[in-house]
Amino acid sequence: MKDIAIIIPIYNPDLGITKKFIEEAEKEFNNLIIIDDGCNEEFKDFFKSFKRHTVLTHHVNQGKGRAIKTAFNYILNEMPNIKGSVVADCDGQHSVKDIKKVAEALLKNPHKLVLGVRDFTSKDVPPRSKFGNKITINVFKIFLGLTISDTQTGLRGYSDILMPIFLKTKGERYEYETNMLIECQELDIPILEVKIRTIYIENNKTSHFNPIKDSIIIYKLFIKYILSAISSFILDIILFSIFLLLTEKILLSTILARIISSIYN
């Protein structure tokens, strides 16, 4: 596929798995954007071996979110013919066949964020991943009104319409992908789910996701979002009461209160 760029963030990888994945990916896709996210010195020759593809380098580890933004920025500035990008992990979780499915879906649905979603009822899913996804699914549903079957998926498709939007999204590490989903709710960006294979190699031991540290960062986002919504609601009520007292006009008081509380939020 010539009009899709595949973004592959890499940090201290399992070389055997990563080499095999990239070799398979380059058979299907012309444009691979490989990000060296501050890997150790021992991996430098590995990155130098890619002559056909673009390698973008962070001299220190900056996180998956920043790696994706670096790739978005490069594509938008240097690759005007690209219609979209797919972010895929290098740890063997994503098959080239599934990456192609996500790529095809984003080309048909440029206004939607495309998620490659796994089946978490599968016995192959590690308990920590199953538990983490179950919690975030319910949090998204209860507090944001979003029904997403795989909130943790790293396989995502972005059109050239959406990349500039998500380039501005806050977050440098794993929380960045959670922030994207929250922004979809806030900006009315539809989400399209594409079913993919559930693949975990050796219980996903090569993943750099820290289930305690990174989960705390992610759930802090939800707490912040919820507190912001509650405080905005309280401010709205207080302002409405004050304006109603001053003007004795319900509609005017409602409009003024909403304007100020929306600026606060």
Image (spheres, helix red, strand yellow):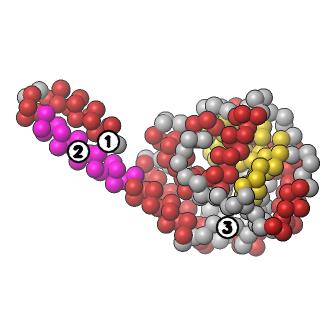
Q: Amino acid at mark 2?
A: Leu
Label 3 and label 2: CA atoms lie apart by 41 Å
- The reply to whether dot 2 and dot 1 touch (C-beta < 8 Å) is yes
- Where is residue 180 shown, x and y percent of the image? 55, 46
* Left or right: 230 in relation to 69: left
- Where is residue 31 shown, x and y percent of the image? 83, 41
Q: What kind of element bears circle 1?
A: helix
Mark 1 — residue?
264
Of callouts 3 and 2, the N-terminal one = 3
Q: Which mark is residue 254?
A: none
The correct choice, above or below, for 161 with respect to 48 in the image is above
Q: Amino acid at mark 3?
A: His
Please state the extent of the stretch shown in magenta in the rendering: 225-243
Mark 2 — residue?
235
Mark 3 — residue?
208
Of callouts 3 and 1, the N-terminal one = 3
The correct choice, above or below, for 143 with respect to 253 in the image is below
Q: Local crowd at mark 1 within 10 Å, few (<14), some, or many (≥20)?
A: few
- Where is residue 73 shown, x and y percent of the image? 68, 40
